[in-house]
Image (spheres, helix red, strand yellow):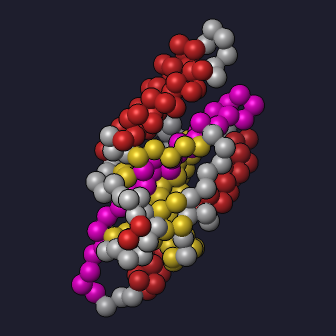
Amino acid sequence: MTTDQVFELLLPPDWVRIAADERGDAAMDSLLERAVGNAPAGRESEVRSVLGASIASAVDTARGQGATDIILSLARVDGVPVPASIVVTRRPAEGGDALTETERIFAIAARENGTVVEVGGRAAVRRVRSYDADGETPARRAISYLCRLPDRPEWIMFTATVLWGSDPALEEPLAALEFLIDAVMTTVRFVPRETAA
């Protein structure tokens, strides 16, 4: 797993970015303690148990996918948690063909039924997939953005996951969350290789 910081972005209030390596463990502990400290009187142990399990599960899943960063929503709307996260992964760029970077992006978009957007000043593929509930896994929508890192032979993918139900009344809040994630992605800026740490 690569651990240098290659991007910056602005996050909404109560969203946090955690490194997916061992550096993230202390950040998770700090987040959990902050949340427990802000919990309603008498509900501290419940918040510690539920939120702790949720954060640990998200981080374990992201680490299993080879993630470098995890962005979690700890926000609440009318007391209800905003069920969203973003997992960031990187992989080596494959070579060997005559396609330019832009041609490759358009080819991926066509093959994956995606759209071409801009992320951090780079051409990127945006793809949306919806998944039905499966056993213990709730229904969810995944919005992914794939682009080539500048000055590096790597691709970076931001995959936002929003949990949702089959209730048609949830479609409007889901669309609002998708819009929020698109807005967050417009703030991505890539860190030049010589300053990445």
State the image quarter where residue 167 is shown.
top right
What is the magenta range?
69-97
- Which of these two is toward me, 103 or 153? 153
Residue for point 31% across, 64% down:
91
Among all residues in the image, which is located at the extreme bottom?
98
Q: Quadrant of the N terminus?
A: bottom left
Residue for point 36% across, 51% down:
67
Among all residues in the image, which is located at the extreme top?
42
Among all residues in the image, which is located at the extreme front?
195
Task: Please indicate, yes or no, whether residue 156 appears anywhere in the rendered image.
Answer: no
- Which of these two is toward me, 162 or 154? 154
- Which of these two is toward me, 100 or 186? 186
Residue for point 37% across, 52% down:
68
Could you say where residue 195 lies in the image, as x and y percent from the top left? 41, 67
Residue for point 52% across, 24% down:
33
Above or below, 59 against 86 in this view is above
Q: Say whether residue 152 is magenta.
A: no
Q: Quadrant of the C terminus?
A: bottom left
**Is 50 placed left or right of 64 in the picture?**
right
**Is 104 placed left or right of 190 in the picture?**
left
Could you say where residue 83 lies in the image, as x and y percent from the top left? 59, 39
Could you say where residue 95 lies in the image, as x and y percent from the top left? 26, 80
Above or below, 141 against 25 in this view is below
Label the magenta part by its dominant secondary structure. Answer: strand
Task: Please indicate, yes or no, whether residue 100 appears anywhere in the rendered image.
Answer: yes
State the image quarter where residue 80 is shown.
top right
Above or below, 88 against 72 in this view is below
Above or below, 31 against 195 in this view is above
Q: Say whether residue 95 is magenta.
A: yes
